[in-house]
Amino acid sequence: MSGEDGGIRDAAIRVVASSLALLRTRLELVSVEFAQERERLKSSIVLLAVAAVAFALTAMVVTLGVIAWFWDDHRYAAIAIIAVIYALAGIVALVAHRRLRREAPVPFGATTDALRRDVEWLRARHPHAHDAGSPPGPATRT
């Protein structure tokens, strides 16, 4: 009996060790993806801030130049046309931002895919196993 107990214990230890190794690998993947997403977001924010300041200064200088150019004859028309141009630029930017957000990859997609493959692999090895959240089939009810 003690030989069986040692064999079962050794097998259980191996299963636990393998499960922990798999969990560690998945957690490392989550950590790497999180770090990548954080760096991408920081870079995006910095670039957007630099672009916003540069475009704001450019717009201010161009606006003042156009209004000064047309001050004597068509000052109100110049102001209205510049305002419409700015509004159109804002709309284009919002539409582009919306498209960018829609086309962005799902955060932690690689982790989700890896966990899905792990579940599929386990189901293939143990066809009688069920999800923790799903009810047992009719054959296992008592």
Image: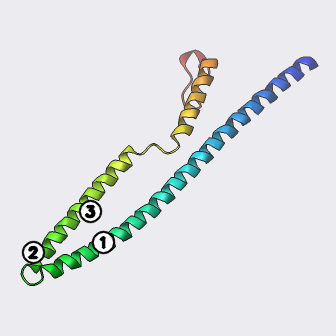
Nearest to N terminus: mark 3 or mark 2: 2
Which quarter of the picture shows residue 120? top right
The residue pinned by badge 2 equals: 77
Point out residue 52 in the picture as x, y percentages from the top left corner. 36, 67
Nearest to N terminus: mark 1 or mark 3: 1
Label 2 vs label 1: CA separation? Answer: 20 Å
Point out residue 95 in the picture as x, y percentages from the top left corner. 28, 53
Which quarter of the picture shows residue 27? top right
Structural crowding at the residue carrying mark 3, measured as other residues with C-alpha within 10 Å and reported as few (<14), some (14–19) or many (≥20): few
Identify the amino acid type marked 3: Gly
Identify the amino acid type marked 2: Ala
Residue 29 lies, with reference to residue 35, above or below; the image says above
Nearest to N terminus: mark 2 or mark 1: 1
Residue 118 lies, with reference to residue 86, above or below; the image says above
Q: Secondary structure at mark 1?
A: helix
Tell me the number on the disc at residue 58.
Answer: 1
Residue 22 lies, with reference to residue 120, above or below; the image says below
Q: Of 18 and 51, which appears nearest the observer? A: 51
The residue pinned by badge 3 equals: 90
- Asked if labels 2 and 3 touch by Cβ distance under 8 angstroms, the answer is no
Q: Is residue 58 left or right of residue 44?
A: left
Residue 126 visible (yes or no): no
Structural crowding at the residue carrying mark 1, measured as other residues with C-alpha within 10 Å and reported as few (<14), some (14–19) or many (≥20): few
Q: Secondary structure at mark 3?
A: helix
Which residue lies at the image location 55% right of the left edge and 50% below the top edge? Answer: 36
Which residue lies at the image location 77% right of the left edge and 32% below the top edge? Answer: 17
Label 3 vs label 2: CA separation? Answer: 20 Å
Quarter of the image where the C terminus is located: top right
Quarter of the image where the N terminus is located: top right
Q: Is residue 10 left or right of residue 141?
A: right
Which residue lies at the image location 6% right of the left edge and 81% below the top edge? Answer: 73
Camera-near label (2 vs 1) is 1
